[in-house]
Image (cartoon, rainbow, N blue to C red):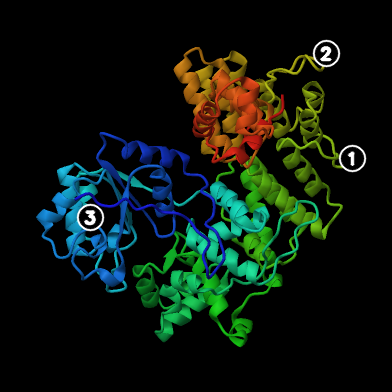
Amino acid sequence: MRAPVVVTTFERDANTLELPWPFTGRDDELELIRGSVAGGRPGLVVTGPAGCGKTRLALQAVRGTDWARVTGTPAARRIPFAAFAHLLPGTVSLHRAVRLLSGVRLLLVDDAHLLDDASAALVHQLAVQGRTRLLVVASDDASGATAGEPGVPDAVSRLWTGELLPRLALAPLPREETTRLMAAGAAGAPDALTADRLHRLCGGDLRLLRDLLGALRDQGPAAPDADTGEWSWRGPLPLTATVRERAARVLDTARGEERQVLEHLAFAEPLPPHTDAFDLRLLEQLEAEGLITVDEHGAVRLAHPLHGAALRAAAGRLRALRLARTPQQCQSALRAEQRALAASVARADVRSVSAPVGDWLVDHGARIPAGYAAVRAGLARLRGELRDAAAWARHGLRWTPDDHDCRAELALAAAQSGETGPAAGEDVGRAATWQAVARGDLEGALRHIDEDDPFSLYDAVRLDAVHLDAVRPDEAPLKVADRLRDLGHGLFARHADALARGDGPALGRAAEALAERGFLLFAAEAHAQAVRAHRDPRAARTSRTRALALARRCQDARTPALAGLVLGELTARQRQIVTLAAAGLSNRQIAERLTLSVRTVGNHLHSAYTRLGAGDRGALPCLVEQPA
């Protein structure tokens, strides 16, 4: 008996009147799964936390193939072969079930952690037999220990622990991909600070993300920003059903003393209290249950950012008024945080630094001093987070419209994103440098380099200039690497020296050192420069791949070092087709212009999407339109 093929289509939900969000990101994982379920392969197990998009990824991977699907459910865990009821006739033995399903070419097993024991044993035997390719999807956080439910069936976990099938452990969707998904699935794109807040709260849980976006939309559409057209969210967390489910571990804690500690921690934010403020016995209990964390300095926090917001939203109004902090109470802590962030920039180390006070104030719509906003903008820009940098600068200008530092940071972020907007008033130096770059005037950009400012001087390296005498003929020649060393910035000097020598491997090592310090955009540029310096084509391709991977995390940065990097990944014909597609031509129009079949054009575009990491045609203009 051949099992019927299950054809899955996405239709409009009659209750919510919403369509599924477009598939975004996961291109590498998608290709890996497709290869694993191709002919001659045994299949794959995909695991990951709840809500990270495992099922959607699996469905995308099997589109267009001959496949059947079974799904585990909590209610049917005690019914033998419940998941296979639509594929098996009546009562069957395990042996006969294996024989009946041996003709299925590809079997998608969804929510395998919820399978009944008989169904789990059947999936295991199908893997042992090897005639049916299996794509098994299971949550790796479904231990069920706290809820008293059985965990993942041993027959399922033995698929990967017993090395019957390879395993892909799916990480939560990165922030950049999550932001693109929000822009595609919501009514317009959120501003960078809202996107950051949603990502912090959801932690890659796409079900929770969609639920929150729906709740925010139902509260009433936020007016889009006049300059960017983006909407923002400030204020309390909507206490939706999904939020209650995800925060149930703290919301359902009814024991008086423990609940009191959790609420005190929630309302203490943004500042963490120390262990000496609570009963140590209670803290040990909550830490053992995974509800709090304690750092090496004794500071206590709730284990998940969502938990504090949910506890505050669930508290009564009077209790919240009694326990909540006010923005005025946080000013001294904000100033201390600003000094710490500025110090990290000064020592050229911009790795992820915790800044809970500023985040908390922005989340609640409180006023932020322009000096703090400028520091946050500069830190984000140096990390390659250009949209975040612009958002922080705008937030500072909202309260202090004439602040010089915020205006300069906004101009820098815009120019390094390839925007040739208006100049930032009388700003000179780095803002003027990058405004000239955005206009295509590289020689003019170098004239604005300040040899006493290490970051300005390093801009010359990013623009491929290793000495400045060419644009300053009346001055003594200045070797940038030596001057950077004199200024105490050996990290940047290593990059400048490797570029001057045209040393591809040294540029690669400099890029790795920059990435280790958090300078992702600088690292991407160094890898891109290494592509041209390498003599070994394989090493050049490795550098290009690394540069592309880092550049995709830099929020649409457009700098000269990255120009041409993306299209360099493609064949000549693919570059030709992608350029036309980015200009808005349809597949048929491209086919007519190049005298190709429509199918050939489609095949080239599909290959180009894979190489470029683009989800669809809509992403091409962002990838292709880079400054010359």
Quick one: 114 or 466, which is closer to the camera? 114
For disc 2, the marked residue is 473
Q: Is residue 137 left or right of residue 296?
A: left
Under tag 2, what secondary structure? loop
Q: Is residue 3 left or right of residue 582?
A: left
Q: Give residue 418's quadrant in the image.
A: top right
Dot 3 alpha-carbon crowd within 10 angstroms: few under 14, some 14 to 19, many 20 or more? many
Question: Can you name the residue that lies furthest to the right here?
Answer: 426
For disc 3, the marked residue is 156
Residue 585, position as x, y percentages in the image: 67, 32
Residue at figure coordinates x 71%, y 17% from the top left: 467
The residue type indicated by label 2 comes to Pro
Q: Distance of mark 2 from mark 1, alpha carbons?
A: 26 Å
Q: Distance of mark 3 from mark 2, alpha carbons?
A: 72 Å
Task: State whether residue 294 appears in this view.
Answer: yes
Quick one: 244 or 274, which is closer to the camera? 244
In the rendered structure, which disc, 2 or 1, sits on the residue that comes first in sequence?
1
